[in-house]
Structures are given as structure tokens and as C-alpha cells.
Image: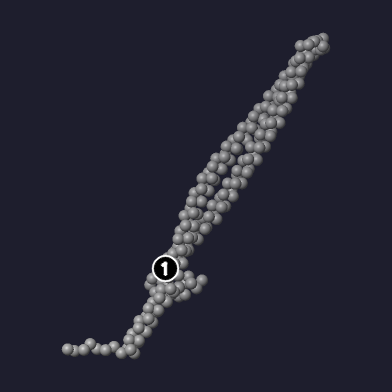
Amino acid sequence: MASSPLISPSSDQRFWSALRGRVDSLLEHRNRVNPIEQQCVRDSGLGKRLREDSALLIRGFDSIASSLSRLTNTLDYAAQGVNDLARSSVTEQLQRENQTTEDGEETEPKAKKQCNSPQVLAEDKNEKENQVDNAAGSEKLNLARKLAVSLATKASSLTQELKLMKSELCFVQERCVLLEEDNKRLRDGIETGLRPEEDDLGTL
């Protein structure tokens, strides 16, 4: 019966030493590559999220800008309406004053005779009250016109600011796309064995 070959302690030690060295080498290589790959994945995911968030914000700003544009147009129409109403009120007031002057000239002889009558005194009182009401109405119209113009100006300013923010977000979105492409090239380089320091992105 043939005996099995004996393994000497020295050969056994060399075998385990070589195996351990190979395992250590593999572990070291994996630990060196994995953080880079994980960083690429994280950067890619972050760039994608930033791009999606930027697109969402841009759509939101488009909606807000559209609403502000409609509000500006509405306020412009309101200001124009207030101006027309104010001009109409002033015209009517002037016509009433002219009519009152003409009537006063025609009825002056009678007014001298009836200046102390209760009817004349009541008419004078009503006329003064109407003048006060007209003055108050004109003042309110002027305030409404100024308010409408102020709101229209603020809405226009907000629209311009939103356009500027939209432009900046578009730049951020384009930058995210470029970063995502750079990360993809870096991942492809790692998979093909190209070290990061040999890649163009790593030298920037």
C-alpha cells in the first residue's frame, strides 16, 4: 500500500503565506477602488437630484411669473379704469359747476328776492354737501389710482426678479448635467482600469 506524500512544515507555511498575501492584495485593491466608485455613485445621484429639483423649481417659477404677468395686466387695466373714472368725475364736476353758474346768472334777480326763503337755504345746503361728497370721492379715486399703479410696479419688479432666478437655475441645471457626464466618464474609466489620477477630470 503506497503511503500519501508528506507535506513539510516549510512548504505548508509558504502556501498559507502566499494565499494570505494574495487575499490581502485583493482586499487592498477593493478598498482602494470602492470609495471612488461609491463617491461617483453619490455624486451622480446628487447631480440627478439637483437637476430634477432645478427643473421643478423652474416650472414653479414659470407658473408664478405667468400669474404675476396676468396680475400686472389686471392692475394696469384697473389703473386705466381708475384714471378714466377720475377724468369722468372731473368732467361731470366741471359740467355741474358750469350749469350751476349759468343757473345762478339766470335766477339772480329771483334769488335776491327769495334769498331768505327756506327752499333756497335747503338747496344751498344740499349743493354744499354734494360738493363735499364729490371732493371726497375724487380723493378716494386718486388714492385708488396710486395704489393700482404701485401694485402694478411691484408686480413687474417681481416678474423681473423671477426671470433672473430662473436664469440662474437654468445655469445650475446645465452644470448638474455636466457633472453627471463627468461622473459617468469617471465610472467608465474605473471599470476599464483607468486610474482616476490618469483621467482628465482628476487633473483639473
The residue positioned 19% from the left and 89% from the top of the image is: 2
In this rendering, position of residue 179 left or right of residue 193: right
The residue lying toward the viewer, choosing from 89 and 36, is: 36
Query: Mark 1 — residue?
Result: 187
Instruction: Report the quarter where the N terminus lies.
Output: bottom left
The residue lying toward the viewer, choosing from 171 and 96, is: 171
The residue positioned 51% from the left and 51% from the top of the image is: 57
Report helix, strand or loop for mark 1.
helix
The residue lying toward the viewer, choosing from 17 and 107, is: 17
The residue lying toward the viewer, choosing from 88 and 201, is: 201
> In the picture shown, does residue 14 fall above or below 27?
below
The residue positioned 49% from the left and 54% from the top of the image is: 53
The residue positioned 72% from the left and 28% from the top of the image is: 136
> Do we see residue 63 in this rendering?
yes
Q: Amino acid at mark 1?
A: Arg
Quarter of the figure with residue 187: bottom left
Are there few (<14), some (14-19), or many (20+) residues within 10 Å of tag 1?
many
In this rendering, position of residue 84 left or right of residue 69: right
Quarter of the figure with residue 110: top right
